[in-house]
Amino acid sequence: METGQLVAALAAGVQSDRVLFREQDTAPYECDGLTMFKAKPKVVVLPETRDEVCHVLKTCKALGVPVVARGAGTGLSGGALPHADGVLLVMAKFSRILEIDEDARIARVEPGVRNLAISEAVSHLDLYYAPDPSSQIACSIGGNIAENSGGVHCLKYGLTVHNVLSVTVALDDGSIVTVGSDALDSAGYDLLALTIGSEGLLAVVLEVTVRLLPKPEEMRVVMAAFDDVTKAGDSVGNIIAAGIIPAGLEMMDGPAVAAVEDFVKAGYPLDAEALLLCEVDGTKEEVADELARVEAILKESGATMLRVATNEEERLLFWKGRKSAFPAVGRISPDYYCMDGTIPRKHLSLVLRRMREMSERYGLRCANVFHAGDGNLHPLILFDANDPDEVKRAEDFGAEILELSVEVGGTITGEHGVGIEKINEMCVQFSSDELTQFHTVKAAFDPTGILNPGKAVPTLNRCAEFGKMHIHHGQMPHPELERF
Amino acid sequence: MSLVETLCNRLAAKEPVSVIGGNTKAFLAGRLKDEPVSMREHTGIINYEPTELVLTAKSGTTLQEIESCLSEARQMLPFEPPRFGDQSTLGGVMASGLSGPRRMHLGSARDCVLGVRLINGLGQHLKFGGEVMKNVAGYDLSRLSVGAFGTLGILTEISVKVLPIPEKEQTQVLQCNQAEALDMLIQIGRRPYPVSAASWIGGALYIRLSGAASGVESAALAIGGDTLNDAGQFWSSLRDMTAPEFNPVGEWLWRISVAPTTPTNTLDAFCFDWAGGQRWITTPPNDLSPFELAARLGGHATCFARDRESGTGMQPLEPGILRLNQRVKEAMDPHGLINRGRLLEEAH
Ligand SMILES: Cc1cc2nc3c(=O)[nH]c(=O)nc-3n(C[C@H](O)[C@H](O)[C@H](O)COP(=O)(O)OP(=O)(O)OC[C@H]3O[C@@H](n4cnc5c(N)ncnc54)[C@H](O)[C@@H]3O)c2cc1C
């Protein structure tokens, strides 16, 4: 299809200055947070009204043109990577907070609203929106819905799926439906759960109603250093075994600590093999109680150093270190590649040891940040994108980590989504019947497959190709093991 | 041949298959058209490691077995599922998607599901989700299947998130009418108190606090009222719906799910739970007006009458949502073989 023709068809229902097609205008949209994958979209549309979104969908469906939705473009799996023959539907202008109901503790927002903007808008009411991805100053709630994003507080307060009451979406044919409601559950199948985490393949999000929580009266964080990652990992199990579910429980390994400390000066001990941040929150009495118990457990578990932040400023500084881990690593290497597997926590030391072996084998450094409470690992592989061989090694290293996650009973992605990045590893985690089932569910929503085609679920052909290539390279770890 | 293999083969041969767990919830949803197979023999806890906060069991395992295993490690199912008799199975709990009083605080059955194995309508035994807290690989078909009454696939294994039993629980009772109770809960909801259940019944508001002893005690002081003595029994009677109010003679019982702040003058509930989100009403037999009422309030109604003979007792779906429901059903069970009659009568 000619670009001019497509632009004309789109401009029939979208104000023309919101339809971009010149190379210099579309170039800024060629990738999301995963910069290893780039593609120029044929057309970028920045709709401002629901009618415009629906017009784009109807037009594209009629013409058989792919539509890729994009929020803030912070995604780390290439979910918002444009389609070279398609339209990139940028939802950033849907940035209004429509309603705040402090009695019901809900907020109704448009999908382009930034995650942190919700908490900021209700802060004066002593309320907040709990899921807090580290990218929260930038990422959009529409993107959070698409990825089912998590944050450092999701062990206690849940993921996006646990904090959203309803979403209004535009379907492939431009019709609009609301899934979920202001009630705690809805009639019929749980289409809300299905929509959340569907990576823009089922529908375009137009509006979101989120649950708000009262701000805890008090939050305290304790930092614990360990001379051994296994001890640090065990201490997490010990805290949970004692019946405590901390608000946040994060771990960093030595290389991550070094990078962060150099960048943020958060007061992290540089000689630590592993650093744990454990936050407890609640009423003053609860916090005092729990903090004392956590400290005792950490000491018993062999912490070499314990420090409780003495004031709010210091608490935020401890967290700033953790939340800046990605950019901090970005300073010590031209590029980094962030992985996202989740593992049963008990396998932590095994997985870390195997990753160290891989690091040597591939000749690439690796720093680890870890949502320790829920087993979600973010190994950061350091490489130089200008060196094609390093890029190749980084990709292979990453793929091997994901396969290791599956091997020990985990998953290839805890919160960043499959996108285009982990599409091959989906063939490792799921059987062809399972993948086919995903495709038929997709077709129930989008029978002609115009929404974000080629992402999230691989075709069986692709898996067959991948299998061939993969086994050729002799990298398939333990093919004899049954999955999980 | 194992039960799972038999069911797979029957479906692969395009034979209709219906399944039940302990058959304690037959009165909910529609009546099965086909003679059901019991999943009770497909039983056993497959994996449980307390420090991972995950339990995986075969779907025919009784709730009783699971809860007693959990309580040995001082853990629990966070969503407090109702137990309609000692034969309730994990599969039945998930298929019906019911949650008890603690749902308002720690989430619903659906919220706690981490993964399932199911047999789809083609007789394929598939695994979705997993045994870890965070997992976004593939569409969330595990949570989709919660509350589907088995119609999207026969659940064979389920992994759920479990949590520690709180160190202390205490229930405060405040005498007040329903409207006052809702007002109070709106105020309390704005404060970070460890409220794990909030229900109104029989002219009193019951607020359960759970957590560290000190936090529970200080919140109880702030909330006021009297401390309930036999709180465990009270909450069980709500959870399992054994309180006499839930078994009205000659009347139909309905659950109305609405926004918790819905004013009390819009529906005449004898009880509410989930801080107002779940309300219970009764009607004369065969009176279907709760559907209209619930729709008007932006919620939905479910009939809990034990003597209802026809229909599904479920809120009719609006056209756009109905169409998606039908298409999802077709995607999972293209020949419409599983649990015929249980839901979505219009679809086939
Ligand atoms: C430094 C950094 C830290 C991060 N930390 C975390 C973290 O702690 N936890 C976490 O979970 N993630 C994290 N992320 C990843 C990312 O921020 C999240 O995935 C986020 O939800 C993406 O939001 P976005 O608005 O940028 O979406 P985009 O990147 O624009 O898009 C992501 C996906 O959502 C789809 N999409 C976007 N908007 C819509 C819509 N309106 N309707 C339908 N589909 C839509 C896109 O098609 C795409 O598939 C981090 C990223 C960075 C760069």
Image (cartoon, rainbow, N blue to C red):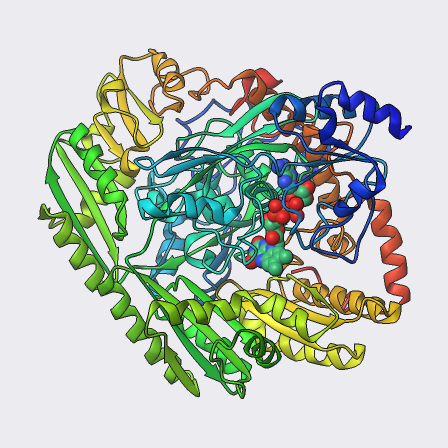
Looking at the rendered image, the quarter that the C terminus of chain A falls into is: bottom right
Taking the spot 67% from the left edge, 39% from the top edge, the residue there is A200
Q: In this view, does A13 lie to the left or right of A181?
A: right
Q: Is residue B89 visible?
A: no
Q: Where residue A79 sits: x, y (%)? A: 71, 47
Q: In this view, does A150 lie above or below A6?
A: below
A133 left or right of B169 in image: right
Residue at 34% x, 78% y is: A295
Residue drawn at (35%, 57%), measured in percent from left and top? B68
Residue B158: give x, y in percent of width and height: 53, 49
Query: Is any atom of residue A26 visible in this view?
Result: yes
As rendered, which of A8 and B251 lies closer to the eye? A8
Locate residue B215, reporting x and y percent.
22, 60
Question: Which of the two residues, A259 or A408, is positioned nearer the viewer here?
Answer: A259
- The image shows residue A345 at horizontal and vertical percentages of 53, 69
- Quadrant into which the N terminus of chain A falls: top right
In the rendered image of this protein, does residue A179 appear above or below residue A461? above
- In the displayed structure, A215 sits above or below B323; it is below
Above or below for B341 versus A114: above
Who's the residue at 35% across and 12% down the image?
B289
Instruction: Give the side of residue B292 with respect to residue A261, left or right.
Output: left
Left or right of B5, for residue B309 = left
